[in-house]
């Protein structure tokens, strides 16, 4: 089932945000935990995020930092394995999809503006066309 994504929740300048500005945006859109997941991995911009694969695979490793974090985002099963909370995976997936939609929207706007400029330049250079539009 295809979903229509409304990327208007993301600011138009989302692709130039970096570090704290980016993390504040993520916090607003996807929540504190998703923001922490990105911070711990040093994913500090939208461009880095959309080019990152398997954003939750780091949870499979053991370290004091990761273990502490894993307790927040996973359920521990009786056999000792961990299950990532579905809200986390859904939020990460939706965030990435929203960013891709926003990027596509911005590319379409840029292409439309370039096409419009081509027409304007063509009209300016051609006196017959210019007379039709004046």
Image (cartoon, grey):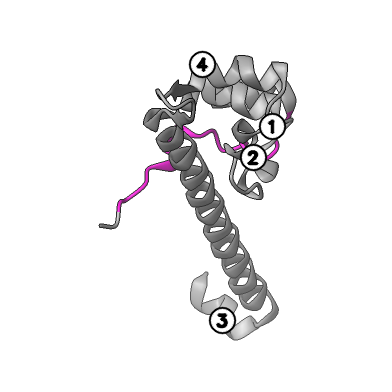
In screen coordinates, is 4 left or right of 121?
left
Which residue ends up furthest to the front in the rendered image?
79
Return the x and y of residue 57 as percentages of the image width and height: 60, 39
Mark earlier in primary sequence (2, 3): 2
Between the residue at mark 2 and the residue at mark 3, the CA separation in whole angstroms equals 43 Å
User: Is the magenta region chiefly helix, strand or loop?
Assistant: loop
User: What x and y, as percent, mark residue 132?
Assistant: 50, 78
* Residue named by callout 3: 129
Tag shown at residue 46 = 2
SS for callout 2? helix
Q: Nearer the viewer, residue 125 or 14?
A: 14
Of tags 3 and 4, which is closer to the observer?
4
47 or 73: nearer the viewer: 73
Front residue of 130/42: it is 42
* Contact, mark 2 vs mark 4 (Cβ under 8 Å): no
**Magenta residues, start to end:** 3-18
Q: Could you tell me which secondary element the residue under label 3 belongs to?
A: helix
Q: Residues within 10 Å of mark 1 (few under 14, many from 20)?
A: some
Cβ atoms under marks 2 and 1 closer than 8 Å: yes
Q: In the image, is residue 17 part of the stretch drawn in magenta?
A: yes
Disc number for residue 72: 4
Label 4, secondary structure: give it.
helix
Of the image marks 2 and 4, the number of the one nearer the N terminus: 2
* Residue plotted at (38% across, 32% down): 86
User: SS at mark 1?
Assistant: loop
Is the N terminus in the top left, top right, bottom left or bottom right quadrant? bottom left
Check the image and report above or below for 129 versus 96.
below
Q: Between label 1 and label 3, give the one nearer the viewer.
A: 1
* Residue labelled with disc 1: 17
């Amino acid at each position: 089932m295809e979903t229509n994504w409304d990327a208007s929740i993301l600011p138009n300048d989302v692709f130039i945000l970096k570090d704290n500005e980016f993390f504040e945006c993520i916090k607003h859109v996807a929540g504190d935990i998703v923001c922490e997941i990105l911070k711990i991995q040093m994913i500090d911009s939208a461009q880095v995020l959309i080019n990152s694969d398997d954003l939750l695979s780091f949870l499979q490793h053991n370290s004091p930092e990761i273990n502490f974090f894993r307790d927040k985002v996973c359920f521990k099963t009786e056999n000792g394995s961990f299950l990532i909370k579905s809200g986390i995976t859904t939020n990460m997936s939706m965030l990435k999809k929203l960013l891709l939609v926003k990027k596509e929207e911005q590319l379409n706007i840029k292409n439309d503006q370039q096409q419009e400029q081509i027409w304007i330049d063509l009209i300016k250079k051609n006196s017959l066309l210019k007379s039709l539009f004046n």
